[in-house]
Image (tube, rainbow, N blue to C red):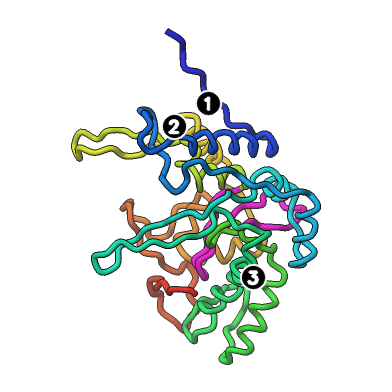
Amino acid sequence: MHKKQALLIPEDYNDFFYWVKERTEAFWSKSKSSNNTEGYPCPEWAEGAKWIGMTNEQIDSIEAKYGITFMPEHRAFLHILHTIDRKEVNEYEEEGETQTYQRSFFYNWLEDEDEIVSKLDWPYGTIFEDVSPSQGVWLKSWGARPASVEEKERIFADWYAKAPKLLPLTSHRFLVSQAGLADRPVLSVYGSDTIIYGWDLRLYLLNEITDHLDLYMPVFDEEDQCYYPEYRDELREVFDLAGQKLPGKDIPYWKELILYWSSGWSSFGLKPPGDNGEMVQPIMPTYVPEEQEATQKTFRTFG
């Protein structure tokens, strides 16, 4: 009997992106009916999918077109991976009927102009929607809250202009794009409720596309009589090691916003205030100006 070889997850970005390409495309080559006894089957929409990388010339032209700068690891991601050759299909229930919608697996910088323009504006627009109300979000470093919306926006716009820039990856996930930072994490931005989804692009992809990387194992629960997904041991080790490095991490400007809501505290390895050990916690503000009461976060539907 041959001992199963341990799964190696490369640390070097180029090696890692090629590993992602090989592993995902192998997973996508499995049909739903194939005999896949170890992991989960490939979704039908992804069967046979391939990555579409960009040339260096194309990446340069995109930077010029949008007036942005991709960091080295983002350029490598775009060159080796970028996006895939079909749209992701998602399903949801509405009034008892199954509805579907499609979106790019990762944004196609050569074709998704409308979506990219919208997402480049997303963090500013959606965060300011939470800041502008009279009892809205207000960071301690901003000083006294002014009465007028115009003055609030002036203060917010100055803060936003100084904060590390964000570039869209998919949905409301954004990679920090600023040289000289110790960490360039991926942020999940839903208005002011912003969290870190991965402290670097490698950790983010391992988190975002775990199923497509075939890094889940179905484990049968005798009590519930059903299967639940669990990380493969090698992935759990990567995340455990990353978790040990969280205390003391920082990201200029964004850290204060991330810690404004209790949902962001785990991004820095901190125990959220008011955590009583329950699995589900209300998302509460952790700084409240003197003139207002603490209220639970209410989510909006951003267009």
Which sits in the foreground, 29 or 140? 29
Of callouts 2 and 1, the N-terminal one? 1
Query: Which numbered mark, 2 or 3, is in the foreground of this view?
Result: 3
Give the magenta part as a residue range: 175-199
Mark 3: few/some/many CA within 10 Å (<14, 14-19, 20+)? few
Image location (x, y in percent) of residue 223: 18, 37
Q: CA distance from mark 1 to mark 3?
A: 39 Å
Q: Would you name the residue on which mark 3 appears? A: 117
Residue sitting farthest toward the bottom: 148
Q: Which residue lies at the image location 61% right of the left edge and 44% below the top edge?
A: 51
Say what amino acid the circle numbered 1 marks: Leu
Q: Quadrant of residue 128?
A: bottom right
Which sits in the foreground, 64 or 111? 111
Q: Is residue 76 magenta?
A: no
Q: Would you name the residue on which mark 2 appears? A: 232
The answer to the question of whether label 2 and label 1 lie on touching residues, with beta carbons closer than 8 A, is yes
Which sits in the foreground, 170 or 128? 170
Q: Quadrant of residue 89?
A: bottom left
Q: CA distance from mark 2 to mark 1?
A: 9 Å
Q: CA distance from mark 2 to mark 3?
A: 37 Å
Q: Secondary structure at mark 2?
A: loop
Q: Which residue lies at the image location 59% right of the left edge and 88% below the top edge?
A: 146
Image location (x, y in percent) of residue 271: 44, 52
Q: Would you name the residue on which mark 1 appears? A: 7
